[in-house]
Amino acid sequence: MRIILASMGLIALITYILSVLLGPMIIEYFKRLSVRQVVREEGLESHHKKTGTPTMGGFIFLVPAILMTLVSAFFLEAVTPELIAAILATILFGAVGFIDDYRKVIRKHNEGLKSREKLIGQLMIALPLALFATYLNPELWIPFTNIYWDLGWLKAFVVLFVVIATTNAVNLTDGVDGLSSSVTVLVMAFFVFVGIKFDMQFAAIFAASLIGGLVGFIFFNRYPAKIFMGDIGSLALGGAVVSLAIFTNTLLLIPIVGVIYFAETLSVTIQVLYFKKTGKRVFKMSPLHHHYELSGWHETKIVRNFSLVTLVGVVLGMLSLIGRM
């Protein structure tokens, strides 16, 4: 166990170093290309000063993390169909995000892909992922139990829904400097734990690589951010989170481990439905992090508190695995 933990720590450390070294080059390169964020006019007034900050920073953690995952998995003989599928899903969701970011940069406006276009792109990735995952294992583990529910091909519909919901939820969480990256580091720590506990080395390697890459990225993304991850980063992270949940059969733990993702999405849903019905708002602004910003919380306080909530969710997720065989 100690050897495995040391291996994952080394993987994370190397990826961290690579991302820290890559960061300044990416930032400078994107500045020269004028790859800069354009903040919505109707957005928070405090965010207007962020206009002009380089975006598409997802490259800083994605490139080192994916390369380190492939190299480590090869040497540790942990290359599996599940790992390849998870990496492909991460890259492809990142590609959808890249197109979205690219359009925003070219148009110099905070409007990239239309909602329908983004959904179609996500479905094109999610559907084969759901079918492949169901082919490998049609059972769905019920948290806090040792029960595996055999859904047959119906599981594909569950997976499809969760993939779309999760990728968009992680995307929504990326709205405050360092928030999405900090929360996702903790979520990835959960998957390292699952990978080690249930001998799913591919999951531990991929998650450890992402931890290293994200911690390195936080060095540049913490308040005040020198670069934003962009949709290329947030959608790719959503793809990584949900892929690891699928292939470790912890899909139903996402609302617990990824409690902040869930809360952000829920806040938007509640806000829209309540406003349509009453013309009034439940939150000062959605997603949830904006509500707290307008309530006077500094961005660093939001990141700290949301991370603490995520840590509680991660611990609960780990405790739920006690009875699982």
Image (spheres, rainbow, N blue to C red):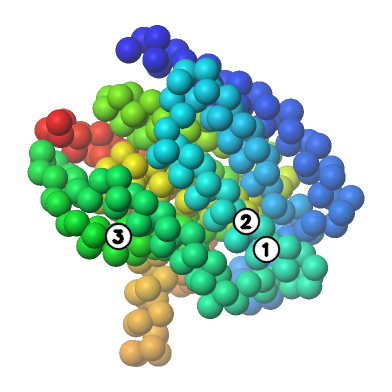
Closer to the camera, 306 or 111?
111
Q: How far apart are marks 2 and 1 (CA)?
A: 6 Å
- Residue at position x 49%, y 65% from top? 124
Q: Position of residue 223 (x, y in %)?
A: 64, 45
Answer with the quarter of the image where residue 114 lies. bottom right
Q: Is residue 130 above or below residue 88?
A: below
Closer to the camera, 269 or 63?
63
Look at label 1 and name its amino acid: Ile
- Residue at position x 73%, y 36% from top? 23
Look at label 2 and name its amino acid: Ala
Q: Considering only order in the chain, which callout, 1 or 3, is on the residue closer to the N terminus? A: 1
* Pointer 2 with pointer 1, Cβ within 8 A: yes
Q: Disc number at residue 99?
A: 1
* Pointer 2 with pointer 3, Cβ within 8 A: no
Q: Which residue lies furthest to the front in this view?
A: 135
Q: Position of residue 100 (x, y in %)?
A: 65, 65
The residue under label 2 is: 95
For discs 3 and 1, the disc positioned in front in the rendered view: 3
Q: Considering only order in the chain, which callout, 3 or 2, is on the residue closer to the N terminus? A: 2
Residue 321 shown left or right of residue 312 in the figure: left
Residue 98 appears in the figure: yes
Q: Is residue 93 above or below residue 244?
A: below
Q: How far apart are marks 2 and 3 (CA)?
A: 23 Å
For discs 2 and 3, the disc positioned in front in the rendered view: 3
- Residue at position x 68%, y 27% from top? 18
The residue under label 3 is: 156
Question: Which quarter of the rendered picture does the N terminus lie within?
Answer: top left
Look at label 3 and name its amino acid: Ala
**Other residues around mark 1 within 10 Å, as few (<14) / some (14–19) / many (≥20):** some
Residue 261 shown left or right of residue 29 in the figure: left
